[in-house]
Image (cartoon, helix red, strand yellow):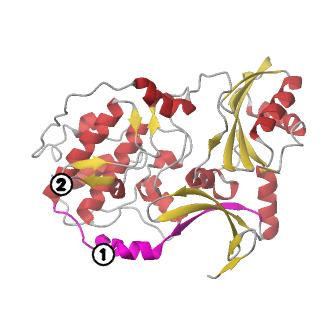
């Protein structure tokens, strides 16, 4: 595919390339626009020469580990993950590429760029940001209904163990839809060279139901796991300034009611794709026919502060009390409906310097009353709304 370079933008095929959303050692993720449909996407660009220079292709061909060797590394991985969880940190992107070995063969976990802190869980006790590497992500993360960071990390550890022992991934598909369907059903087969104990153990980890999935305390007692196991010995901990730790994660504090952040949270590529109407991961797991939507979203090219002000202006005349902080709002109705008071949460996400996505979801009350509210509410937002989720869906239908 050839690239056409213009004075303003670089165009690759039908995609107009924009700003860089993220950058790793061998690849970049860029914001892009489909010039034919107007849809926004995230595109990952891999430096092939860089990959060849570092002989990454050859490294992928070295094959599987023997079961005892894989178990030894897995034991260290579980010890490290258990330690993170005991400190309230959930990694959320565990995969072989993020595991390092020191000169003594001791395993280390790296790249905490997608990690979450225990303070980031919502009122339901769950995390809600879909992130990670698709082949290693737990089913409940893809469902976009909230997940426990501990159980999702355990799932990723199970995928890693499978890869170490098999030399290939348990879940693969020709496209993301097929891949996610396999993950949601835990549709995998252990190779014949796995021992029976290993097969049984891995199936307990790769349980698609997070409630019945094996936990780390149970892993530490498993027959296969404890063979040759040496409990970890930690050096005496140095005093850590918790103010510095809190500062790293203070963006996520739900209880703040004063707006102190300079700009909204940036929506990562994985989450942007998962929330897109045309690629709703939730649609892969359950039929939506007959269900009434409890949330919607729209995009805006206006500044975030202006969007927040317009939301507040539109909500108050409709009889809603407003609490705001960190580019989030909680709207509480002052009247009782069929299922109590209607309550709505909104949040502004930045996907590019001049583009924001606003999520509006019902958190309490009747869904039909939420629809009626949104119809009136959106009228007051016409100055800031660029495209609604419904308009995007209609445009896509017209282009088919």
Residue at image position (34%, 26%) is: 240
Residue at image position (67%, 43%) is: 349
User: Is residue 243 rendered magenta in the image?
Assistant: no
Q: Nearer the viewer, residue 312 or 20?
A: 20
User: Is residue 42 rendered magenta in the image?
Assistant: yes
Give the residue at mark 2.
103
Residue at image position (17%, 53%) is: 105
* Viewport quadrant of the C terminus: bottom right
Quarter where residue 384 is shown? top right
Q: Secondary structure at mark 2?
A: loop
Closer to the eye: label 2 or 1 = 2
Q: CA distance from mark 2 to mark 1?
A: 22 Å
Residue 271 locus on image (x, y percent):
58, 50
Label whose residue precedes the other's in the sequence (2 or 1)? 1
Q: Is residue 203 above or below residue 42?
A: above
Give the residue at mark 1.
58
Q: Nearer the viewer, residue 215 or 12?
A: 12
* Viewport quadrant of the N terminus: bottom right
Q: Secondary structure at mark 1?
A: helix
Label 2, residues with CA under 10 Å away: few <14, some 14-19, many ≥20: few
Q: Is residue 113 above or below residue 50?
A: above
Residue 127 locus on image (x, y percent):
51, 36
Q: How many marks?
A: 2
* Residue 286 visible, this angle: no
Quarter where residue 226 is shown? top left
Residue at image position (19%, 41%) is: 222
Q: Is residue 210 above or below residue 250?
A: below
Q: Which residues are magenta?
A: 38-66
Residue 193 locus on image (x, y percent):
18, 65
| 313 left or right of 179 in image | right
Residue 347 locus on image (x, y percent):
69, 36
């Amino acid at each position: 595919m050839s690239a056409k370079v213009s004075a303003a933008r670089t165009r690759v095929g039908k995609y107009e390339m924009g700003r860089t959303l993220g950058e790793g050692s061998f690849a970049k993720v860029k914001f892009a626009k489909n010039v034919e449909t107007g849809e926004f996407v995230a595109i990952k660009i891999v430096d092939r020469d860089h990959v060849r220079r570092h002989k990454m292709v050859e490294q992928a061909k070295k094959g599987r580990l023997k079961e005892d060797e894989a178990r030894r590394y897995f034991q260290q991985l579980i010890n490290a993950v258990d330690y993170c969880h005991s400190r309230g940190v959930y990694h959320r992107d565990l995969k072989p590429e993020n595991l390092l070995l020191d000169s003594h063969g001791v395993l280390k976990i790296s790249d905490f760029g997608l990690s979450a802190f225990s303070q980031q869980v919502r009122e339901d006790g769950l995390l809600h940001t879909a992130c990670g590497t698709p082949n290693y992500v737990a089913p409940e993360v893809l469902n976009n209904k909230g997940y426990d960071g501990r159980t999702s990390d355990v799932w990723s550890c199970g995928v890693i163990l499978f890869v170490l022992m098999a030399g290939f991934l348990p879940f693969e598909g020709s496209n993301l839809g097929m891949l996610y369907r396999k993950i949601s059903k835990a549709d995998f087969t252990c190779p014949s060279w796995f021992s029976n104990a290993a097969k049984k153990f891995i199936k307990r980890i790769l349980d698609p139901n997070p409630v019945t999935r094996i936990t780390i305390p149970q892993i530490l007692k498993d027959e296969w796991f404890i063979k040759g196991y040496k409990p970890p010995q930690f050096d005496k901990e140095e005093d850590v300034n918790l103010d510095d730790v809190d500062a790293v994660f203070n963006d996520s504090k739900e209880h703040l009611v004063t707006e102190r952040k300079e700009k909204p949270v940036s929506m990562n590529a994985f989450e942007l794709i998962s929330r897109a109407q045309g690629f709703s991961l939730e649609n892969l797991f359950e039929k939506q026919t007959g269900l009434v939507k409890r949330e919607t979203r729209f995009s805006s090219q206006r500044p975030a502060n202006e969007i927040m002000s317009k939301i507040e202006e539109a909500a108050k005349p409709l009889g809603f009390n407003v609490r705001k902080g960190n580019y989030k709002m909680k709207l509480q109705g002052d009247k009782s409906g069929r299922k109590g008071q209607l309550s709505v949460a909104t949040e502004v996400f930045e996907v590019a310097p001049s583009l924001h996505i606003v999520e509006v979801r019902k958190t309490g009350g009747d869904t039909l009353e939420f629809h009626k509210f949104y119809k009136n509410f959106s009228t007051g937002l016409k100055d800031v709304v660029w495209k609604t989720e419904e308009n995007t869906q209609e445009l896509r239908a017209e282009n088919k």
